[in-house]
Every structure is written in structure tokens, then in C-alpha cells.
Amino acid sequence: MKKMFIVCSLALFFAACGGSGDKDNNAAAPESTEAKSDDTTASSESGNPSYDPNRGEGKFHDVQLSDKLDAAMAAKGQKIAELKCESCHKMTDERLVGPGWKGVTSRHKPEWILNFVTNTDAMIDKDPKAQAMLEICMVRMPNQNLSDDEAREILEFMRKNDGVK
């Protein structure tokens, strides 16, 4: 039951309202995210692309985070979260429309979080964790059209919210 709550909380965490859609989604990722394209997708026996649930569905792989918080990046992430996320997510573990953000960075790898917030539809369609959260919460997170930089800034704010200093 607790796992289902956590999964639901994360799904709702990513459900946010608004977004002008005028952001440049092709912006270069910050150095620390090491975004890479995945041009070599293996196929399963059925001919469908294989899926690695430990990686997430998207371009972020092997994200290296500093042990120390980037305060400037976290401040930018907080402003974005206030605009696009806080109408559905609380910074505590309490659920609003989506799950609370407390502890999200300890429950999910940074690659998974970045891929989910930048490639929401594909993650919900393919990722077992995202699908489980959707089943519990019954709310599909809308695509917020976040740039790679904005996603990374939100991740840094999440880390700050989880006590990284």
C-alpha cells in the first residue's frame, strides 16, 4: 500500500498545470545532465523496441549530480515549479492533485525524473512505475514543454526540497 502511495505521489508530482509551450525544447542540456541521444534501440522478439525500466524513456542517461546543491540552479527551479508545478504538487509528502515532492529524489534516479518531466507521454506509455502511478492517481500529467535546462533546474530544486545542501 505504501509503495502504491509513493508511486501515485510521484505521478501526481509531475502532473502540473499551465505552460505556454513557447520554450525551446531543443536547448542544449546543462553539462551535468550529459544528455545523449539513443539512436540504437534494441528490439524485442515481438519486433517492438525494448524498454529498460531502470533507465526511463528519453534522452537522459548517466546523469552525474554533485554532492553539493547548486543554489542558483535550485532558485531557478523553484520559480519554474511555482509557475508550473505547485498547483498540483505540494513540497511535503501530502498529495494534492499529484503526489507530494518530499523524498522524490531518493525514490527515483535523476535520469528517470528528467526523462519523465521532459518526455511525459512516452514515459506514461512505456514505464511501469509511471503506469502504476497513473492507475492509482487517475490523472495523466500534462506535458509542460520544459527545456532540458528547466528540467535540470527543477531537479535541483527537488534536491533542495529533499535536504541536499
Image: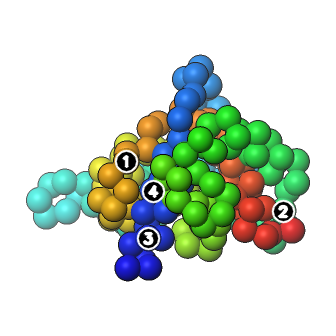
Residue 23, above or below 47: above
- Where is residue 12 shown, x and y percent of the image? 47, 53
Which residue is label 2 attached to? 69
50 left or right, relative to 102: left
Give the Cα separation between the discs numbered 3 and 1: 14 Å
The reply to whether callout 1 and callout 4 are in contact (CB within 8 Å) is: yes
Q: Report helix, strand or loop for mark 3.
A: helix
Comes first in the chain, label 1 or label 4 = 4
What label does residue 11 carry, if any? 4
* Tag in front: 1 or 2: 1
What label does residue 5 carry, if any? 3
Query: Label 3: how many residues lie within 10 Å, few (<14), some (14-19) or many (20+)?
Result: some
Q: Report helix, strand or loop for mark 2.
A: loop
Query: Label 2: how many residues lie within 10 Å, few (<14), some (14-19) or many (20+)?
Result: some
Identify the image quadrant of residue 4: bottom left
Which residue is label 1 attached to? 139
